[in-house]
Image (cartoon, helix red, strand yellow):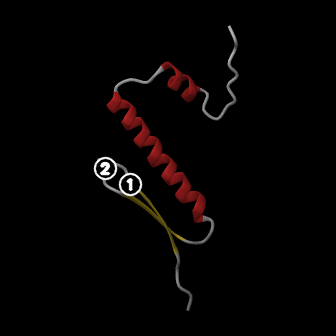
Amino acid sequence: MSSQANLHAVYTAPDTDPKTFSHEFPSTDVPKIQDEINVYLTARMEEDKKAQGTVSEKEAKEEDYYGEELVEEDA
């Protein structure tokens, strides 16, 4: 009889309840939990931005080009 393993990750931050992510383990579940965590963290970042009320021009530009190489031009 084989036992089932679980993969757990817990996110904690000030002023929020801990968020637990859990998936049964075959190795194919690792990308699933990564995706779930990324979606959650992206939502938290958006909430934080809204709570701050402003996004700097630099942050907005970085977000527009996320994942791409951004070359700064010298003026």
Where does residue 21 sit, x and y in percent of width and height?
A: 44, 61
- Element on which disc 1 rests: loop
Where does residue 61 sit, x and y in percent of width and height?
A: 56, 22
The residue beneath circle 1 is 12
- Relative to the observer, which residue lies in front, 37 or 75? 75
- Element on which disc 2 rests: loop
Residue drawn at x 55%, y 29% as measured from the top left: 63
Looking at this view, name the residue that lies furthest to the top: 75
Where does residue 46 sit, x and y in percent of width and height?
A: 41, 36
Where does residue 43 sit, x and y in percent of width and height?
A: 42, 42
Q: Quarter of the image containing the N terminus? A: bottom right
The residue beneath circle 2 is 16
Question: Label 1 near label 2: C-beta < 8 Å?
Answer: yes
Figure quadrant of residue 55:
top left
Looking at this view, name the residue that lies furthest to the front: 74
Cα–Cα gap, marks 2 and 1? 7 Å
In the rendering, which numbered label is found on residue 40?
Answer: none
- Relative to the observer, which residue lies in front, 26 or 48? 48
Residue drawn at x 54%, y 52% as measured from the top left: 35
Placement of 73 over or under 5, stated as above or below: above
Amino acid at pointer 1: Thr
Q: Is residue 31 left or right of residue 48?
A: right
Q: Quarter of the image containing the C terminus? A: top right
